[in-house]
Image (spheres, rainbow, N blue to C red):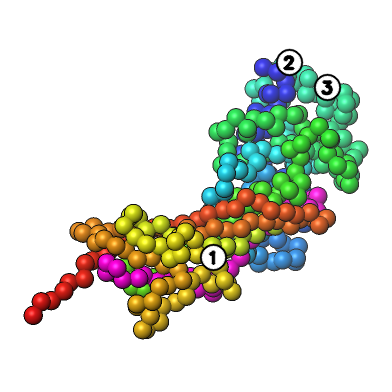
Amino acid sequence: MPAVRKSSLCFMALALGATAFMSTPSAWAARGRGGNSETDTQVDGKGAGQDLSAIAGGVSFDRSRNGRGEAAGPVTAAGNWTPPACWYAPKYTPAQFKKERESVWASESTGAQWDLEQRKRYVDGEPYKDFNADKAGKGYWWDSYVNEARSGEPGALACDKPTFWVDNGDPPPADVPEAVTPEILAHLAYAEVRVPDTEIELAPKANTKVNLPTWAWLDKAEFKPVSVTASVPVLNIQATATATPHSLKIEPGTKDATLHPASGECPIQDGSIGVPYTQGSADQTPPCGLTYLRSSGDGTYKLQATITWKMHWTGTGGAGGDLPDGTFGTTQNITVQEIQAINR
């Protein structure tokens, strides 16, 4: 096995474990579990109490402005967009790297030839000397990290360069396109965004009649922009991915229905979607809604309501731009009955 590939696989296992980079200008102390990853609280007095989570990857996430509630969920990105499968970021100080690598050598699990090449590279000056101990506090050892959600994909093995050194204030080597940047952080933050449930208000609510307009709306108090900020404290870079509700798409669950408007797309206006039903409006055509033309019989129609969220990001140095739109939807069961006429 080539030395580079073996190094990559070795450190990939570490990245997926608990050996996230720990020596930072701002201390971070693990407090428990939150969501799908460790929840941390900044203990240097800045931003104390914020909902922050750390994942293996040298990246911290501020989710304090994320969507809340059990029904909140991730958006589905338009097209074939996916977050990065792997990236490079600071992982070790010289002392930490020395301790880690010497423990690997002591296990004798990587083979004498690989161990010899590693010693030449990091100890004997080809090109590094004694793990750059003389540069302690002046830079960090960078290594690859793997996105756990994509760890089984071929792209997770793309970051196969051996661990390398970067001085404070210097950019990473030009031949490392996966080195963490504000844009990469924005993509990672996108994957952490959670938007609220899209159960729309209906009138009539769950039981309606054939040819009776059903009004649909979403209260602006429930649908506001949400965001997640990803940062690498040791590099003083960050990016915020923001999701802003844009429109509602209604799919009635049957072809026997008329949509209002005909496209089924209800745009957001003044922060709200549609208009709440008011007494006396039953015979009017709602600005957002639908009319079922046939009874659901003994069953129900599955009305699907999908919100499109516009995604954009801002980051360190004035960077920013658009990200692929995201969608999130839920299904509601609707019973449609025939209007019973009484003959006298």
Front in this rendered view, residue 171 or 330: 330
Q: Secondary structure at mark 1?
A: strand
Residue 15 position, x and y percent, is 65, 38
Res 252 seen here: yes
In the displayed orientation, state which residue is furthest to the bottom: 280
Kind of residue at disc 2: Gln
Magenta range is 209-237
Report if the CB atoms under discs 3 and 1 are less than 8 Å apart. Answer: no
User: How far apart are the two marked residues, 3 and 1, measured between alpha carbons?
Assistant: 63 Å
User: How far apart are the two marked residues, 2 and 1, measured between alpha carbons?
Assistant: 63 Å
Residue 52 position, x and y percent, is 65, 59
Kind of residue at disc 1: Pro
- Residue 62, picture quadrant: bottom right
Residue 315 position, x and y percent, is 76, 55
In the image, residue 8 sits, relative to residue 61, either above or below, namely above
> Which residue lies under the disc numbered 2?
113
Identified at 88% across, 29% down, the residue is 129
Dot 2 or dot 1: first in sequence order is 2
> Which residue lies under the disc numbered 3?
120
Dot 3 or dot 1: first in sequence order is 3
Give the foreground label among 2 and 1. Answer: 1
In the image, residue 272 sits, relative to residue 77, either above or below, namely below
